[in-house]
Amino acid sequence: MSVWRRLNHIFVYSFLCLVALLQLSPLLATLFNSFRSTKDITKFPIGLPTQYNLENYIEAWRVGEYTRAFANSIIVSSVSTISVVLMAIIAGFFLARSNFKIKDYIITYFGVALSIPVFAFLVPVYFSFSELGLVDHLIGLVLLFIAINMPFNILLSRTYILGIPRELDESATMDGCSVYQIIWNIIFPISKPIITTIALIVFVTTWNEFTVANTFLQSPELKTASTKYVLFVGERGSDLSLVYTAGIVTMLPIVAVFIALQNYFIEGMTTGSIK
Amino acid sequence: MARQVLSNRTRRQRLIAYASVLPIFLYHFILIVLPTLNTLTASFTNWNGIGKKQFTGISNYIELVGDPNFITAFGNNIKWMIVFLTLPIMLGILLGYILSGVKKGRLFFRAVYFLPYVISAAIAGKIFAAFYNPYFGINVALKAFQLDFIALDWLAPKNALFSVAFVDMWHWWGFLLVIFISALQQIDPLLYESARVEGASELQKIWYITLPSIRQTIVFIVLITMVWSVSTFEYVWVMTRGGPGSEILSTMLYKNAYFKYRAGYASSIAVVQMLVSFLIFAGFGALRKRMED
């Protein structure tokens, strides 16, 4: 029995390790290639670097104009994140607590809005924004990112606020606090876990987003990091070491945060997907 | 008197609620729903995106049905759907089941499998495209190991769709795994215990306990997989731009809207996508109702 069990254990863990290795192999190969020269990569596509220096990285950072690209990404993702968090808490609060006639309709509305795919509205929005001069502007992209991320996160925060005992804000009302004082002083601090989750979801999805960002930002100097990478590979695709190095540079911020906060990340990004 | 104060107060609060929620609702309505309605109307016009719309009836839809490109694209979306309904879901359930059974390292493996999910399609797509390159990619290594027979031309028309889907699956199945692990953890351990006492095999346990217990999660995943397959875009566009062999509805739509100045025709493709998605939702709704009855 115990021998069988041990064998079974060995088999299970070898299988898990094998899958892990397969899953990581493209990333490891990319990481290794980021230190190799184009000549070496052309000769053989996967292999260990002969030396570890940051030459490729400095070159990729310079050629890809990554300072600019990361600044764009940080601006777009931070502004979208802060706006969505504020809207989600405010709308979530009133949709959980208040009694007004159209409340249920609005909840249903956001529920249905969840299932509207990007391509349902992309073309008309693009041409309207184009007329308003909002295409090829970070502001235009941010406006859309906020709208796209709103429904899910409003419903998420509403569900959370429903779970906060009513007595807390009722007693504050008795003490003469205004509604917004209650939101700010009571709901906000208690909702920290859901706020962090919403912030994480919005930040990562907007950081990684391709379709809308690539459509609405066209000038190379306005591109976000991930859309810039596609452009970069299009222009410098033959310089293989730069392709891999720039790939690592572009994915590094998110992957680093993921490794640091993995469990929080995983739970955050899958929250609300299932009831 | 007290009642008067109270009702004034509730009235005031109601007003604040309206004033807070309505702008948020309107913001979303104007940026998302209004354009969606515009897509519907534009699909009945010959709109080029910039000029005036001219009503052309259902001519876009008639053209669509006769467009061989559309038939190919639609078929490719179906192929995509079938692939995503099988491989990633099976992998997610299998690894989820195994991981639920181990104590040491569960969180570590979960994180490793999930990692590709946080990487942008733009990056993953382009890096895999480099690996798929027939001259400088993995094929060089495969040939060196005498594995010429699997050194296919990955992004050639014949293989492109599956090669692209493979990358999306690499990125996607870890997400499913996490969903399935949390569903599997809801299963009452007593069920497995009694199955063990009765001498059930591992396969019997999976078939009679595990799968029925996570049925609702599976149905949900099947639903979102089907709906997402209809409007999938990013990986295909990044890797092949919907070139020969990998044209799908969204890439066809994108080209018509932004490269061929045929926003009206593109809109009719978007309407088809919405219609199919709606039918899938409706079908699942009906199925759910029948299951509850």
Image: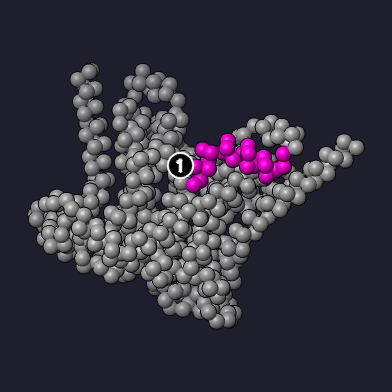
Residue B242 drawn at (x, y percent): 35, 67
Residue B221 drawn at (x, y percent): 45, 45
Pointer 1 residue: A268
Residue span colored magenta: A177-199
Quadrant of the rendered image containing residue A230: bottom left
**Residue A141 left/right relative to A246:** right
- The residue depicted at 45 percent of the width and 41 percent of the height is A268
Q: Would you say residue A130 is visible in this rendering? A: yes
- The residue depicted at 47 percent of the width and 58 percent of the height is A76
Quarter of the rendering occupied by the N terminus of chain B: top right
**Residue B251 left/right relative to A104:** left
**Residue B89 left/right relative to A187:** left
Amino acid type, residue under disc 1 in the picture: Gly
Is A185 within the magenta? yes
In the image, is residue B200 above or below residue A145? above
Q: Which SS does the magenta portion mostly show?
A: helix
Residue A19 drawn at (x, y percent): 26, 41
The chain to which mark 1 is attached is A
